Amino acid sequence: MPAGMTPVYLEEGRTRTFACAYEWPGWCRSGKDEVSALASLAAYAPRYAAVAKQARLAFDAKPTFHVVERLPGSASTDFGVPERVTTRDTTPLAAAEGKRLATLLQAAWDVYDQILASTPAELRKGPRGGGRDRDKMADHVRDAEGAYVRKLGLRLTPPDRHDHRAAAEFRAAIADAIQRPSKGTPLAERGWPQRYGARRIAWHVLDHAWEMQDRSDRPKA
């Protein structure tokens, strides 16, 4: 791959395509096709830069992409969820890469917490009047992570999100599972490889964090 380029993969459904960066869990955006998905991924680079900064990692906010892999999408893809496991996800995970994944996942949680704390309780509705308000969205993120942990072989109950100590312990258990050196196989039957787990969890956290930001804005006159 040419130097200085960001490796990405495409998950191509019938009506929606996701473009995701291999090395940056959570930096994953969609569009109606390859061109619009890659354009959206690029447009969100400055926002993902806050995650890289929190993790103290160098990040190119004006990237050039190199598509390394194309995967067929599914109904989940078209619904709006990046759900395909890549070839790279199932290769051996060394300690250094595992630690980097866990650090970026923790950074995504930190950015989410910062945005949540500054978000008003009531959010601007969508064009059809839909969309969760802040607290329901935060509960949804917590409940989703309660399901995700089982994909990582963990039996944990998601804590009350106002219990910061319990939430920190819950996240630490996830991060520990993500960073453990492995052969790259799923951590549970019908579960997720660690790279995919980090990507899916970080994507879900950031997708809702950015939604909160967007729907906190006042409508333009």
Image (spheres, rainbow, N blue to C red):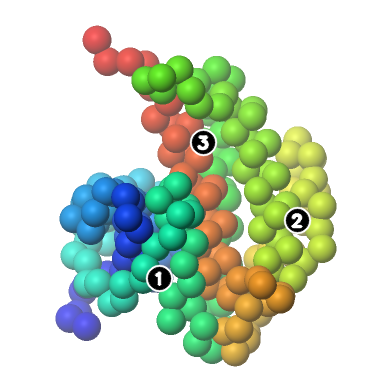
To which residue does mark 1 refer?
23
Whole-number angstrom distance, CA of label 2 to CA of label 3: 20 Å
Q: Earlier in the sequence, mark 1 or mark 2?
A: 1
Whole-number angstrom distance, CA of label 3 to CA of label 1: 23 Å
Residue 140 horizontal/vertical position (percent): 64, 39
Name the amino acid, label 1: Glu
Q: Residue at x 65, y 71 (%)?
A: 191
Q: For numbered disc 3, what is the local secondary structure?
A: helix
* Count of marks overlaid on the render: 3
Q: Crowding near pointer 3: few (<14 within 10 Å), some, many (20+)?
A: some
- Report the front residue among 30 and 116: 30
| Quadrant occupied by the C terminus | top left
Cβ atoms under marks 3 and 1 closer than 8 Å = no
To which residue does mark 3 refer?
115
Residue 143 sits above or below residue 195 on the image: above
> Among all residues in the image, which is located at the extreme top?
221
Q: Tell whether 13 sits left or right of 111.
A: left
To which residue does mark 2 refer?
170
Q: Residue at x 19, y 65 (%)?
A: 64
Q: Is residue 141 visible?
A: yes
Q: Earlier in the sequence, mark 2 or mark 3?
A: 3
Q: Nearer the viewer, mark 3 or mark 1?
A: 1
Name the amino acid, label 3: Ile
